[in-house]
Amino acid sequence: MVADFITTVGDYIWTYLLIGLLLGCAVFFTIRTRGIQFRMIPEMCRIMLGRDRKDKGGIGSFQAFAVALASRVGTGNLAGVASAIFIGGPGAVFWMWITALFGAATAFMEATLAQLYKKRGREAFYGGPAYYMTTGLGARWMAVFFAVLVLLNFGMANQTVQSNTIVASLSSLFGVNPLWVALPIALLAFAIVSGGVVRISRVTSILVPFMAIGYILVALYVLLTNLGAIPQMLGLIFKGAFGFRQAAGGMFGAAIMQGVKRGLFSNEAGEGSAPNAAAIADTTHPVKQGLIQALGVFVDTILICTCTAIIILLSGLWDSGADGILLTTLAIESEVGVFGKYFLSAAVFLFAFTTIISNYYYAETNLRYLTRWKWPVWTFRVLTLAIVFLGALIELQTAWAMVDFTMALMTLCNLIALLLLSNQAFVLLKDYRRQKKEGRMEPEFDKSILPDIASKLESW
């Protein structure tokens, strides 16, 4: 009953308010930045592959990118895409693409502001929406509300979804009791998160490229072995997104709803989660991390989510009645044989496990905002161990409902803050472009360009 109530309220927020605001902000930021997410892709790649201040002992741009991408690339890319297609039809894939293409501008804005207002910690920088809401807007009430939502979402509900997916996949594959899968996963997660953001960033910077490249290669194999079916697949996507029959049957709205909702759950653009990772980078200019986080949206949705959609649609099983991870499993097994089942289980483990440890960092960052005491952090680490273990053994209906509900409220709160602070990000982007035009390879930020808030920028 609780799950039904949360789902009803969450759907109301999504349907009548958030989708319009989310897409509206994404289009507005795209226009004001003159399509930064399209025009500056080469610069994004250069920053990601280059060197920054990380040589001085800090956390570099790529490591911060990996932490954010680890959270983005999770069960949403595997089970979430499948569920979106199951409920909204192939047209949902198109609206996922739209959410990512325009949402990348929103990701740029939130990551840039997180860098601008970051704080200096003992081991690394830290920050996120709660910090730019407090320092930039002077709205501590909003920051506290947002931080609590992050704890509920990324510290609890989302962790349950990720661990449950891992255990369900591995226990069924090997025919073992879920308890024997849940316990080592919980202990391994605890061992990593207890090392703080430095250990988390190191682990994710190794695992994330490995898992992403492997999944892309499998999808590419499926694509190449079904070249003749590609036009039909694209037809399904575009007809499902705009077709008269779908509109008349109510599938048009379902396609948009599922595409935007699951697209956001996957790439997190505008949600306010990735800025917590963006803030940890030790870089010379806030815009650098904004650019690299915009690239992360493309990698997550345009690459990884599309890989899942390709596998499902080319398999012809998208309307078989299967949903979620079961649909993805059946599709990949039909395309690459029994190897697909084992490969997907490995992918589920890597995707979901890296999401667990990144989600933990998001939650810890916001817990540190709420209290300066150290004992709540260690208590929360132990609680994370329990959540990952117990979450793998419970029903997911309430957890999914809580994820959607808190994600909607987080996004609404964050988008309001982004709109109010957007002029500062535009000034930063203008400064970055000016320095690039002057021939400076690595632009450096001077807080004097923002005189009204210069005294508040303690880390620059």
Image (cartoon, rainbow, N blue to C red):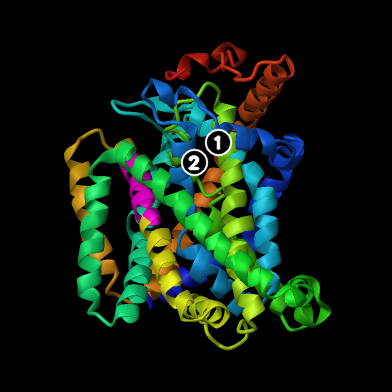
Q: Is residue 104 above or below residue 330?
A: above
> Which residue is found at the position 59% from the left and 79% from the top?
86
The stretch in magenta equals: 354-367
Q: How many marks?
A: 2
What numbered label is drawn on residue 331?
Answer: none
Amino acid of disc 1: Met
For this view, does 431 lie left or right of residue 61?
right
- Residue 167 location, x and y as percent? 31, 71
The answer to which image quadrant residue 280 occupies is top left
| Near-viewer residue (2 or 207) | 207
What numbered label is drawn on residue 48?
Answer: 1
| Near-viewer residue (314 or 255) | 314
Indicate the secondary structure of the residue bearing disc 2. helix
> Which residue is found at the position 56% from the left and 57% from the top?
264
- Given this view, does label 1 or label 2 mark the residue nearer the observer? 1
Most common SS among magenta residues: helix
What numbered label is drawn on residue 65?
Answer: 2
**Name of the residue lying farthest toward the right:** 244
Amino acid of disc 2: Phe
Quick check: marks 1 and 2 in contact, CB under 8 Å?
yes
For this view, does 157 lie left or right of residue 11?
left
- Residue 207 location, x and y as percent? 40, 51
**Name of the residue lying farthest toward the bottom:** 320
Q: CA distance from mark 1 to mark 2?
A: 8 Å
> Which residue is found at the position 50% from the left and 25% from the top?
52
Q: Is residue 51 above or below residue 81?
A: above
Indicate the secondary structure of the residue bearing disc 1. helix
For this view, does 93 lie left or right of residue 75?
right
- Residue 213 location, x and y as percent? 52, 55
**Visible in this render: residue 240?**
no
